[in-house]
Every structure is written in C-alpha cells, then in structure tokens.
Image: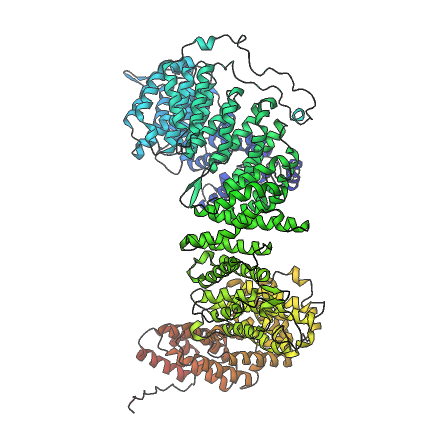
Amino acid sequence: MALCEVPAAGGPDEEAEDDALTRGAALEAFGESAETGALLGRLRAVHGDRAAREVVEERFRVIMDKYQEQPHLLDPHLEWMMNLLLDIVQDKTSPASLIHLAFKFLYIITKVRGYKVVLRLLPHEVADVEPVLDLITSQNPKDHETWETRYMLLLWLSVTCLIPFDFSRLDGNLLIQPGQTRASIMDRILQIAQSYLVVSDKARDAAAVLVSRFITRPDVKQQKMAGFLDWSLCTLARSSFQTLEGVIAMDGTLQALAQIFKHGKREDCLPYAATVLKCLDGCRLPESNQTLLRKLGVKLVQRLGLTFLRPKVAAWRYQRGCRSLAANLQPHTEHWPEQKMLVEPSDCHEEVEEDDVPEGVESVIEQLLVGLKDTDTVVRWSAAKGIGRMAGRLPRELADDVVGSVLDCFSFQETDKAWHGGCLALAELGRRGLLLPSRLAEVVPVILKALIYEEKRGACSVGANVRDAACYVCWAFARAYEPQELTPFVTAISSALVIAAVFDRDVNCRRAASAAFQENVGRQGTFPHGIDILTTADYFAVGNRSNCFLVISVFVAGFPEYTQPMIDHLVTMKINHWDGVIRELAAKALANLAPKAPKYCTTHVFPRLLTMTRSPDLHTRHGSVLACAELTHALYRLAAQQSRPVTEYLDQQVVQGLKQIHPQLCDRQLYRGLGGELMRQAVCILIENLSLSKMPFKGDTIIDGWQWLIDDTLKSLHLISSHSRQQIKDVAVAAVAALCSEYYPQEPGQAAPIGHEGLVEQYLAELRSPEEMTRCGFSSALGALPGFLLKGRLQQVLEGLAAITRASPEDMSFAESRRDAVRAIARICHTVGVKAGAPDEAVCKEHVGQLYSTLLGCVDDYTTDSRGDVGAWVREAAMTSLMDLTLLLGRSQPELIEAHICEQVMCHVAQQASEKIDRLRAHAASVFLTLLHQDSPPVPHIPYRRELEQLLPRSDITSVSWNVPSQAFPRITQLLRLPTYRYHVLLGLVVSVGGLTESTVRHSTQSLLGYMKGIQSDPQALEGFSRTLLQVFEDNLLNDRVSVPLLRTLDKMLADGCFEAFAAEEDHPFCVKLLALCKEEIKKSKDTQKLQSSVAVFCGMVQFRGHTRRQALLQLCLLLCHRFPLIRKATASQVYEMVLTYSDVVDADVLDQVLAVLSDTAWESELAVVRTQRNRLCDLLCVPQPQLVPKVSPHH
C-alpha cells in the first residue's frame, strides 16, 4: 500500500474511531492511523539525524504500546503499515541505516501483534527467497544495535520456506570453477539457522521458527532432518546449564526441537522420538535453575509423547451438548434435555485399547507429572497442558490412571506448587472432556479444599496461586459439564465460590472466584440466587476488600443457603488468619452476619470462639477475642431493637466464658512480650464492647481487673512498638470511656463512692510522668471520662491538662503529649457542657479566659526536632479545639466570647492559613471559614465580618483546595487589606515567601508582590504595611524560623521595587529602621544562610538615598572581609550586580575600577590580602574604611 493510500487525518474512518473512543473506557479502534502514517513517511528524512530518529521511534513505540492489550485493533491497518516499511527494505537505494530503522519499526509491530499474524503479511513468493537469504547472510550476528533486523529477516525467511517448490530448482549450476562448487540454498538456510540457534539475542527465537518450517519441508526432511537432529542432540549433550553459553545453546536447540515435533508429521518424527527422549533424560533439565530451560524441556517432552501416540480423539471422552446461555438461564420447569454425553462402549470399537502403548509414553507422563510440581508457574502450566493433550490420546483406563496420579498432588504432604499444578491439570482435563463425571465425587472435595488453601510461611503466606487456579477449575467445569452432572455439588461449589469472592485476602482470587461464579450462573443455571448475587458481587465490586467483608457479605448472607457456610468459614479460616487486618475485618463481618442467624451464633459459634481464646497460637487468641467482642455487641444491638436484654441471646455459660477471658490471659502472663501488644488491643476492644452491651457485671471483681489492664496499658505505651502504639492507645481510651460510663455510676448522675473516687487523681498524677507516651495515654483518657466522674474536679483536670501543654526545656520535644492534651481539653468541654456559675461541673465564665489562653498558646507551638516540625501536630489540634470550643460557646452562651478573644482566635487561624505547610494551611482555612460562616447562631465579634464574607464567600469552603498554593495564597493575601489581620497574615506569608518549597514560594511571592503593586498609589496603605512589616521583624528578631525567611522576602520586595516610594525621600524612617534591624539580626551571626540573605537585602537598600545608602555600603564592605570565604565571595558577586543595577551608586569615572576590584580579587584568599582590596574599594565608594578593633585580654 502506497503512502497516498494511508487514511487522511480527519477522514470519516478516523472520526468514527474517535467517537468510539470517547464512548467507552476501553479502546475500540486504532485511532492514530494518520499520525502513524506520517511517522513512517518521515523515516527516510530522519534516519541520518539521531535526535530526530529517536523522537520518531519513541512516539511510534508509545502509540503501539497502547494496543498491547488489544492488538487485534491493529489488524485493519497492518497491511499498509508493513508495506510502507517493506518498500524501504526492498528499495536497493536505501542506505543500511534506513533499512535497520525500518526493521526496528517492523519489530515493534511484531512485538505488539505477535509474529504469527505478521508472518502472514510478509512477502513469500519464489522471487523473495534469495534476496532475503542474501540480506540475512550479510548481517553481523555480533552487532548488538541491529538485532531487530536479524530477528525479522529470520522470520521472513521462515515464511519464504513455505513455497511449494523444491529448493534444488532455485540452485541452478552450483559449479563455480573446476573442482569448486557453491553451497546450495538448502545448505545455506540450514547453516544460517544453526548459527543463529546459539546466539544470545532474540534472533534465537526466530531461528527456531525458521528451523521448524524448513526441516519439516518434504524435500528437506529426506536430506537434512536426520543430520540436524544429530547436530541438535550433540549440542545438548556437550552443553551445560551451569554456564551462560550452555544455557543459550540449550535454549535455542530445545526451542527448535519442540517446534519440529509440533509442526512435523508424526510418521517423519516418530523414528527419532525415542532417541531424542533418551538424550533429553540425560540432560537432567529438572535439576536446572533456569526456568526457561525447564519449561522448554516440558514442552519437548509432551511433543515427544504426542508423537508416540496416534493423533486420534478419544472416543470415550465426555461431550457436553447444549451450550446455549439463554437455555441455561430458563426456569428449569422441564426435564433436562436428553443428550448423549458419553459414547457407549458398543459404539466405540476397542481399537485404541487394543493398541500397545509405546514404551516412552510412561516416561513422558511421569516427567509431566513431575513438571506439575515445578517451582515456576510457567513450567507447571506447560506440564498441565501436556497432561491434557496426552490424556486425550490414551485409552480410557490409562487416562483414568493419569487422573488418579494428578489427584495425588493434593496431599497435605505436598507443597503449594503441587496443589497449583494439580489444579491446572484438572482444569485442562475437564475442559477437554477427559475428566469423566464418575470422577467428580473425588475431584470436587479436592477443589473445595484448594479454594481455601493457605499455608503460613514466616511473616506471610503462600497459596494465593492455588486458590486462583481452583477458581479456574470451577470456571472450566462450568463450561465442560451438563447441569445435571454438577447438581449434587452445586451447594458446596456455590458456597465455596461466594466465600472466596467475598472473604479471600487477595484481590485476584476474589475476582477469579467472582468470574467463576458468574460462569457457573450462566452455563449451569443452577446456582441459588445467582443473578441477584452477581449484580452485587461482580468483578469490580469485589476489588475493595473492606467493602467485601463488611457490605457485600451482609447482602449475600441474606440468602439462607449461604449464611451458615459464610459464618463457619469466618470462624474456621479467617478469625485465626495470619494477617491482623483480616482478623479484624473477619470479626466485624461476623458481627454483621450475626443478625442473620442469631441462634446459630449463640449455640455454635460462641462455644467455638471461647475455646479458641485459650489457644496457644497468638493469632487464634487475638482473632477469637476480637470476634467475641464484636459478636456480643452485635447480639446486644439485635436484642435492643426488640427491647430485650442481651442475656436473651447469651446463656450463662457464654456470659461466664466472656468474663473469664481476661483472668485466663492474665494468669498465663499473655499480656507480656510482643504478643502482649495484640492481646492488650483485643481485650481493650472486648472491654469496650462488653461495656456497651451492658453485660451484667456491675460490682463484679472483673471490673477491677479490666481497669487494671487499661491503666497498665496506658502506663506502658512507651514499651509498645511505634507502629501499633497509636491504635492501642485509642482502643484503651475507648475502653475506659465505655467502662466508666457503664459500671461506675452508683445512681444516675452519681459516681460510685468506693474504689473509683481516686481515678481522676491517679490520671492527673500520671500527667507528670517523664514518659511522653504515658502523658499521651492519660491525657486522652481524661478527655474520654464521663461527666459524672469530672464533677467536682473539672477545674483541677483542666489545670492539669493546661500544665502539660506548656513546653518546658526538659519536655520540649513532647509534642504528641501536648497535642493529646489539647484534644482532651476540647473533648472535656463538650462532655461537661456550658453552664453559668458552676466552675467545678461545667464550663463557665471563670474557665473561658484560661481555656483560650492555653489553646492560643498552642497555636504558636513551632517546636522542631529530628522528626521535623512536630509543633504542627499541636497547632493543628489547637485550631480544631479552638473551633470546637468557640462553636460550643456560641451555641450555649455566646456572651462568654469576648471581642478581644474572638479577634485573637481569627488572627491566629488566619496566620496558619498563610503558612507554608499545605496540610496545616488547608486545615486552618477550613477552621477559619467554618467560624466565619457559622449561622446557627453566628460567632459574635468576628472583626470585619462583612468584608471577610465578600473576600472569602461560603462557596470557598468546598470549591477551593486550600492545600494547593496556587488557589490558597491569592485569597489569603487579600486579608492584608484589613488592619486587624495584617500582622498575623504577613507573619505567615513571610515564612511562605522565604521558604524552600518551589510551588509554595512561587505562588506566595506572586500574591504578595501583586498586593504590593496594588497599594503603590495608596500612601496610607503602604505606610501601614511597612509599619506592620517592621513590627514583624522587630518582634521576631533573632528568631531564625521567621527572620531568615523574612530577609529573603525583603530581598524579593526590594528587587521588585515595592518600596520605591520611600527612595525619593532621604533617610525615610522605614529605611532607617529596616537597616538597623538587619544590622542587629546579623550581629555576631555564624549562620551562612542568614548572612547571604542579609547581603541581598543590603544590596537592595542601596536604592535608598542618604545616610541609609552609606550605611548599607559600609555593611557590604564589612561583609567583604567576613571570616567565612563563602560570604566574602557571595558579597562580592552581589555587590558587582548591585553596582550595575543602580547606576547612581558609583561615579562613572571610577565605575570600571570598582568592577575590576570586585571581579579580579580572589575573595577566598587570606584576609590580609582581601582587606587591602576591600579598603581600596571603600575609597572608591567614598565609604570610610572599617578599622580593626583589638581584642581586650580577660585580665585587663
């Protein structure tokens, strides 16, 4: 096809393809035909330009790779694409580099579509044989850049070998001179094929294809087959899989032999089969660690076995009749259609049985059975296909023996590899009709075991591949057997598949089970409620594990056929699973399923779970305790709906069993060590759920035991591994809240007088612990206590929590304890509520000032340690608590919110909303907007409420992503217009503008400079801003967190001319004050970042006239002799730029001298040398030379 025949861009075909692409998520057509044609048309132009060639090649790869999963979409376009490339190859004027490029593009097409399809489109006439042969002969096998050319030429040669003429007709006269002859075409092809079978690149695969097509030709096999097989066997015999060269040679030879015995006629190959098998046995390939060699060995063995047996289809095989999905889905009101499933013995003459089975067949089958247990999936899969092919040609009795041998793979003494291989083999046998219905009674129980097969290995497990293969077996059986054959097993198979689809740990197994279930519903039509289940548990829905365990399982369990098997599976297989996440999900799923079968859970499940709590296995104990907790609470909720006590569902024995869990674990000291972490977490969850379920334990000694466990867990949090510490703390706090609420009140609203009155005091004492995690635990526990325990102690509790929010030198890094204390304060306020005149019972006027003072102090927590800005945790919690407290007061007694407090809250939150941490900025903006737009009732005394509502409308709450700098800073910068907010917003902005994160710096700088440009014509606004800026600088002098970014911000503002209005006036107060602050900031500083930033600021301040300029130049001259060479060099560089930028700084007659001194001096040299040049520069700039101040000795 010529280039002019390529479909034009925008043509009707391409428009239809584009429409198809926009309608569906998957590709529906080849949409880049025009672009591909253009790329192929450019090859002649770009082949000499390496950069252009690589661009075209990369773009072509990208286009082709899109169709890797749907290569058939290329079929309508393959012919014209290949013709364009073959025209280049066949053009005798094409340079070698262009030909190699064309073959590279042909290989890319072949890689995507597959060589078998491409072969059909390659020219294969008689006239093509010699040109292709000459072209491949001229190639250099050692050129690693052109292997695609050799690969495609060998494939092309293989298809030209199919011409229906004897090769000798193409030879002509082979005599060149007397006594000298040239090689025949047949010899040349064989020589090339043999040479390329032992190369290390992909041409080896193409050579194997060539050999299989060439050797099996009628004219070649008579002359060359025996010799080639001898060469192949000799190559195998002398090669070792211990060396790289041996592996390569064996790989090519085995590929060639397998292809020959696949494509050759049986009568031609049979005489050599036994010899090849014997040689293959001698190679001992199963001992090799090369997966590919073992796979090729299995492929060759099965081809040899098929050569031994006559190619007859087994007359005894099972044949399914009706395959109509529509018929299967019809209601089964009629009898099963009468069909002939198995050929009667009378119809099948015992011809095959009478034949002697060749000797080699037994050896072949034995090797294939060994291959089923190989360590690699590809080898097992090849062996399984070989078993299926061989069994199809065996007599019935021998094939049945093979099935029996396959079933031996499913012993629990075998590894997961054997189980996987056995499943693949059973699927192949069933799919081919070789697994007779009489065997199903033995096979189905094995497959049901494989569907739940899992073995723990160290910290993980094996068996996912076995379960996946078992699903494949069920899928294959659905297509292979008539419904009445599988009817006895429908209940078991359907339950097992549903359980695998919902409860399997691995997503690929859940999806495989869902697909198998769907296939059975469609093909068999006998699965109970199949369509209903499929609409909920389809291939995509089962992708989310939590959704499967907690949502889909409840729906499926609504059908009685599946309820009990699902519950049994959870108790048997998932409660004791090695993965903690699965155990937790299983416990919750069991609770969700309990209302479907409450009686069964009470009489069967609970006794089993209580027995499992005493298991020596850690995972079993952990999962069973969790399950007891969740199941108890589920039955309580069910009883509560019917206004009945939970003991209606739990007999006395179960209640006692639940009560004994903690004492038994404690007596066996199972709360210690690594396993103790899991058991503490599980028992805390148990305590919480039993308390919430109102179990009849009030006044029982078990309550003291539970309280001891919770307290001990909170005290020893620092001993628990960091990854589970937070979770254990949370469950312990939840447990203490539920326990106190249920078992400590003596009368409604009153605390128990005996035993628990010291709980609050004990927790307050623990707040002073030297361990940070202990403080965290008891802070959270105090926040979770019920209101009646806080009555009379509220002031004491709030003061205790406030005390640990104030950082002291010894606990400066205890950010997590301060965070939890802040959260606890807000939680306590919500618990006790707001009530006037009751300072020890509820929040009142006496508390408000102290609460806000504590929380506002925490908003300014900028503690850093080796983990980074850990104070951010405290600031985030403080903002949340400020919001909660303010909304609480606003709903109850808004008059308690004073104007100055509300102003501080809004200003501090606005500052956080303008800072550099994205997550914190987004949270602060959310808090700010929530307080601003609170309607019922509105928060009182918000400064500039009306202006804020215009600048930050309600829609910004949802429409703006505040963690994205490009959206946040343009909005928050607008608050600089409002005097009340200006100081705090500017304080946050300078940290962002002078930060390090590129996107934050860029967008915050743009927003700030944009605001400054807008106020240049407003002297009052500019004066107000400059005063605020100086105030920020003065308040944060020597505070490196702010001062260093502030210097960078000043540099950008000075460079952008933000203060040009002050340059016209000599010694403007702003300039004088700014210079003084900068000098004070860098005084005696050794911080190179700060010093470099100050150099830029001093250079920028040269634009101000008068004394300010002279002082700035003097500071720069001082820095030119700084003790750090880095600072001297940086100063000289920036002063050079400054002199060129501000032309009025230096007189024109000395400008060249100044520039020469700055550029020619080696500022990293010794100070004595540098000082001379610096003094010369001072004279040129009319600046007094700095004088050395002699150090005073201590004794003077």
Q: Which residue does the image show at 44% across and 22% down from the upper left?
A: 404
Q: 1049 left or right of 333?
A: left
Does 156 appear above or below 641?
above
Q: 415 left or right of 238?
A: right
Q: Which residue does the image show at 48% across and 70% down from the upper left?
A: 767
Closest to the observer, 824 or 894:
824
Give the percent coordinates (x, y) of residue 611. 49, 44
Give the percent coordinates (x, y) of residue 267. 41, 12
Q: 648 left or right of 1143?
A: right
Q: Quadrant of residue 224?
A: top left
Q: How many marks?
A: 0
Give the percent coordinates (x, y) of residue 454. 46, 38
Query: Can residue 869 be seen by looking at this rendering?
Result: no
Closest to the observer, 626 or 299:
626
User: Which part of the image, by quadrant, shows the C terminus?
Assistant: bottom left
Does 367 appear above or below 1023?
above
Q: 93 left or right of 23?
A: left
Q: Which residue does the image show at 61% across and 26% down from the upper left?
A: 524
Give the percent coordinates (x, y) of residue 351. 47, 8
Q: Quadrant of residue 161?
A: top left
